[in-house]
Image: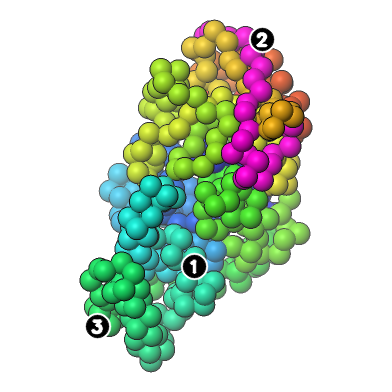
Amino acid sequence: MVKAVVGANWGDEGKGKITDMMAAKADIVVRFQGGANAGHTIVNNYGKFALHTLPSGVFYDHVTNIIGNGVALNIPILMNEIKSIEEKGVPAPHILVSDRVQIVMPYHILFDQYEEERLGKASFGSTKSGIAPFYSDKYAKIGYQLQELFDEDLLKEKVKRTCDQKNVLLEHLYHKPLLNEEDLLATLHEYRDMISPYVCDTSAFLWNALKEGKTVLLEGQLGTLKDPDHGIYPMVTSSSTLAPYGCIGAGIPAQELKQVITVCKAYSSAVGAGAFVSEIFGDEADELRRRGGDGGEFGATTGRPRRMGWFDCVASKYGCRMQGTTDVAFTVVDVLGYLDEIPVCVGYEIDGEVTTDFPVTSKLEKAKPVLKTLPGWKCDIRGIKKYEDLPENCRKYIEFIEKEIGFPITMISNGPSRDDIIYR
Ligand code: GDP
């Protein structure tokens, strides 16, 4: 059976922790989209880790971790991550990489930087990991599929074509140093040698595993609102962040997906540009940012301060709906314990009308939050294991949000560790 752990909002909802926790009972964890542009933070017995490319099952000896075909694979980053977790005492993880995954090339990273530079103030706030140029090339059919590294004649021919094409842009659009065929080919040989022990037909592996009754966990990156179709286009990521895409990005039959756990954080945060209706500013935002997550709300990849806001029922209801949610995991609830009152965004006012349906971007830019204020619980809820033991106002906060979004909150996370979880 296949389960997915995905985000309802802009990412950073705490998916890493929930996946790590759920991986205890899984056989296989698969990354199905995105690349090293976002990170999961995981706290466990080995320490604190920021994973960018590795699936969150790498801390368990019984889990096979798969980099699926839908991922933007940065080979040196993957290798460094494997090395860095082994250095902290984690046993060598079991990793398989799809022979159909495509590779982030060094020039994708450069083009990402050059384009953001060129756009200046109009830039997308990219993490400059090469993700947008990578997916552009994939769909323009000029990307490098992993299996191509093992066909020398094809590779030489392709490297020549790449240099011809990219150098036009480098010379005339960006005025930057040109690519050189020999260097690029040498880099690809290095990549081939690094990755070869891990490469296999992962869809066949998954098919056989499912036939044997194994449990597969699909691990999403970012959240619904960053989906290129259903998110806040164009301030989105370049691959689908939705659970159903997990079946494509992993190479498994869609009907096998039985459980979709959508992670919602008890308040909002976002990185990068784009409309963020329930955003807060000034001291109020600084305090939530400082107290948020586990040691503050700063990007796991870039260290950038995250934009902060109150919980957004409109965005989260939509976020859960688009994921095909069966369960909501409601995270970082412990952080709100300092507030006397907690505002929640329950509607958007657009051109004088209030809606609870998440609109297209042009309307979203005009939306003003309709806030409802709930009483806080003013205590530390870390360590609580049973739902009934939560303070009444905390339960009321959870139940209010559950009703607004219309999907069952079955897990409540009240701390960064694996054990800080309340099942309902
Ligand atoms: P992801 O990309 O969705 O995995 O999100 P992040 O890696 O940004 O995770 C959010 C942060 O919150 C990380 O620092 C986690 O360790 C932390 N975290 C996750 N769940 C909880 C929780 O319930 N309470 C607290 N205080 N921190 C949490």
Cα–Cα span, label 3 and label 2: 67 Å
| SS at circle 1 | helix
- Is residue 369 rendered magenta in the image? yes
Q: Quadrant of residue 157?
A: bottom left
Q: Name the amino acid, label 1.
A: Ser
**Quadrant of residue 187 within the rendered picture:** bottom left
Residue under circle 2? Answer: 392
Whether 329 is drawn above or below 6: the answer is above
Q: Position of residue 362 (x, y in %)?
A: 62, 45
Q: Name the residue carrying label 3.
A: 182
- Mark 1 vs 2, N-terminal side: 1
Q: Nearer the viewer, residue 154 or 166?
A: 166
Q: How is the image coloured?
A: rainbow
- Label 1 crowd (10 A; few <14 / some 14-19 / many >=20): some
Q: Of the residues tagged 3 and 2, which is closer to the observer?
A: 3
Query: Residue placed at 59% from the left, 20% from the top?
Result: 385
Give the residue number, with chain letter if any, for mark 1: 136
**Is residue 15 among the parts visible in the rendering?**
no
From the top left corner, tell me how far across and down residue 294 is, in percent. 42, 28
